[in-house]
Image: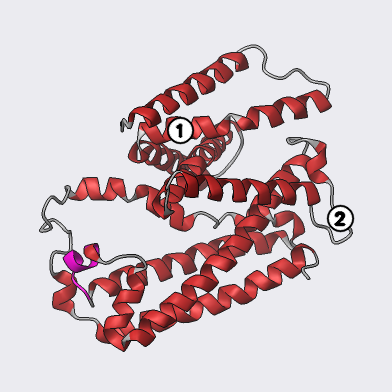
Amino acid sequence: MLRGVQTATFVNYVTTIAKLIPIIIFIIATLFAFKWHTFTFDFTGLKIDGAPSLFEQVRQTMLITVWVFIGVEGAVVCSGRAKSKRDVGRATILGLLVCLFLYVAVTLLSMGVISTPELAKLPNPSAAKILETLFGKAGAFIIGAGLIISVSGAYLSWTLLATETPFTAARLGLFPKCFSETNKNGTPVFSLWLTSCAIQLCLIMMFLIGGGYDDLLTIASEMILVPYLLVAAYLLKLSRTELVSARVRFIASLATIYGIWLLYASGLHHLLLAALLYLPGIAFYMHTKREAGKPGFHGPNKFLLVGVILAAIYGVYLLAEGITL
């Protein structure tokens, strides 16, 4: 029986090691099977019939790029439970570098085993098909087992991350107080129940409407783009009003520009649909303000509320009409 966040973290640690083994096997196998002429053949993918331009290919992969790196901020979200604040920064940078190495290695080495046009036709998980060409059915089994472990571990880790976010916000007075309640094991009970129910509801809804992995990927990535941009923009604002180094100003400016680019690359219709999913947050905001004895939306904030509602309505219209902007 799981006893609190610490036990769940240990389980996640074990699953992380277990799912890294198939990835390392894949990298070593493809490294030995790598062929330079295969790697350079149609490297840009422009020889494929109907292939978009190189710029358009980059734009279309932006959401996937965001998706694969979502979670690197997990150490910051759980920083309140860390023994040393310095470890939080180290864990974030180390996690980013490890993920970057694994994704780049798997992607580029795959292109040296199977040509780009052939890779484009492979069904998911494509890594299983690639390893199957090298090891036979055993290769596909290795990737399949790693995928099952990875999904199980990701489900647990993301439940922890999603649970910790409203818990921390409640402790800071930004979420209703009930989210800060914990049991004897230090687990935020109400936050965990709400998170688990929300996850199950989303999965059931995607199943009923016939949505797949790509749909969930798009929705999750789009939902986090706005917070990423707001965090970068706020850092940029602070860098212009506080005494900080030029390096911080440069990073804040670069992050803000990149955030704007990501919103453009994802498409306006996705941003409008994200506004629809943000609407339930208004209820939590109003309840939190009421607990603090403060007014909710007032002054210019009322126009912001109206803007979000109108954007959500327009997003529903685009979804119903099947229009892509």
The reply to whether the C-beta atoms of the residues labelled 2 and 1 are less than 8 Å apart is: no
**Lateral position of residue 57 relative to residue 148, left or right:** left
Q: Position of residue 76 (x, y in %)?
A: 64, 54
Range of residues picked out in magenta: 114-120
Residue at the far front: name it.
208
Distance in Å between CA atoms under marks 2 and 1: 36 Å
Q: Position of residue 114 (x, y in %)?
A: 21, 74
Q: Give the mark nearest the N terminus, 2 or 1.
A: 2
Residue at the far top: name it.
299
Type of amino acid under label 1 = Leu
Disc 1 element? helix
Disc 2 element? loop
- Name the residue beneath numbered marker 2: 183
Q: Position of residue 206 (x, y in %)?
A: 49, 47
Type of amino acid under label 2 = Asn
Residue at the far right: name it.
184
Point out which mark residue 273 bears. Answer: 1
Please name the residue shown 55% across and 45% down the image. 245
Q: Nearer the viewer, residue 255 or 144?
A: 144
